[in-house]
Amino acid sequence: MSFSGTNATLYPPPPTNSSCAPIEHPLMVTRVLTGDPDVFTNVYPLWTPPLGRALFGGILIGAAVSAAQQTVAPEFVISHMHCTFLAAPDTNKPLYYHVSRSSDQRSVASRDVKAAQGGTIFFSAQCSFSLAGRPSPVIHHAKVPELDKQGLEVPPPGPKTTREDVDPFYWRDYPPTQDPSTTPSVNNTLHSWARSRGNMSDSQTSHMAVLGCLTDSWFLSGFPDMSPTAAGPGGKNIRFMISLNHTIWFHDPYVRLDDWLLVRKASSWAAEGRCLLEQQIWDSKGKLVVTCVQEGVLRLAQPKI
């Protein structure tokens, strides 16, 4: 992954860690050494996707998880997060994550996180944590589609010329013969396999931060494949798309993001210039690990009369 300008961090960034996957680095935050002890800043420069005009929202989600986690006891794990995207920050300047300790109870805790630059808030998140226990049997969860793992080999390194080539996650169509651009979705639903590009460290916090980041990856941008008639061929009818808010329920704090995960994306409603998308993610053994809902602004070309 390539990063933004050299002035995009408050402190000189350390060398990248070879034991970490590339996506772990832009989600790392450190405490600001002066002032409020619950203010954090990005360790590495911010990441903007190739051809992207703004910071990838998943970076804000993952970094907020990293910041909030540092303010709770280590036995607490994130269980829920509600995010609001307010504006796009300047990727050539440091970003500051202000954490408020909203509540600390015996088995739960709450944190509010605001990402800001120069007094302007660009992103906010309300994070809920629960006391981690031993893994317990699942009472019930959404049924996983058939787990067809065909075609999940990791390709050798090659030239990085498109966003797919430098995406921090590997993606595979599901089923493997499906091409979303030419195959109509069923009930406005798409399935794919995903995992981190490269093996990750063993940090539980890092896996949760990367999982939060993954939930925003190719989510709203998958709308053209979920609703191809409205979007038009190649999404040509879409004039503008942007995420408004994003809610995540984390079901398994022990999931690894360097293992393949099955991602189901669907859109249950789109009207009035907005669309609602739902997402479920299962691990490779069929256990539900995430439920996610996102609302986005959608502008389509007006039909000619």
Image (tube, rainbow, N blue to C red):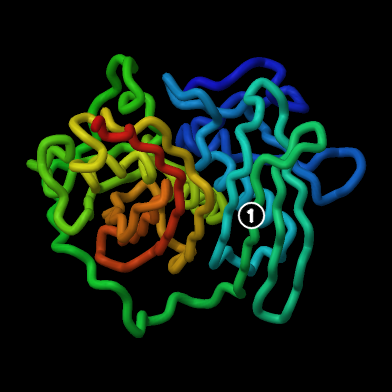
Q: Residue at x 73, y 44 (%)?
A: 97
User: Where's residue 125, x and y in %?
Assistant: 64, 54
**Quarter of the C terminus within the rendering:** top left
Could you tell me the amino acid type at mark 1? Ala
Q: How many marks?
A: 1
Can I make out residue 281 in this image?
no
Badge 1: few (under 14), some or many (20 or more) residues near its Cα, within 10 Å? many
Q: Secondary structure at mark 1?
A: strand
Is residue 199 or residue 110 the one in the foreground?
110
Indicate left or right for 190 with 259 as reference: left
Q: Is residue 194 above or below residue 12?
A: below
Residue at 31% from the left image edge and 68% from the top image edge: 287
Name the residue that disc number 1 marks.
Answer: 125
Query: Image height check: is 292 above or below 54?
Result: below
Q: Position of residue 102 (x, y in %)?
A: 77, 66
Q: Which residue is at the front of the view, 174 or 271?
A: 271
Is residue 149 shown to the viewer in this render?
A: yes
Q: Horizontally, is 65 left or right of 172 in the view?
A: right
Residue 85 image position (x, y, % from top left): 58, 45
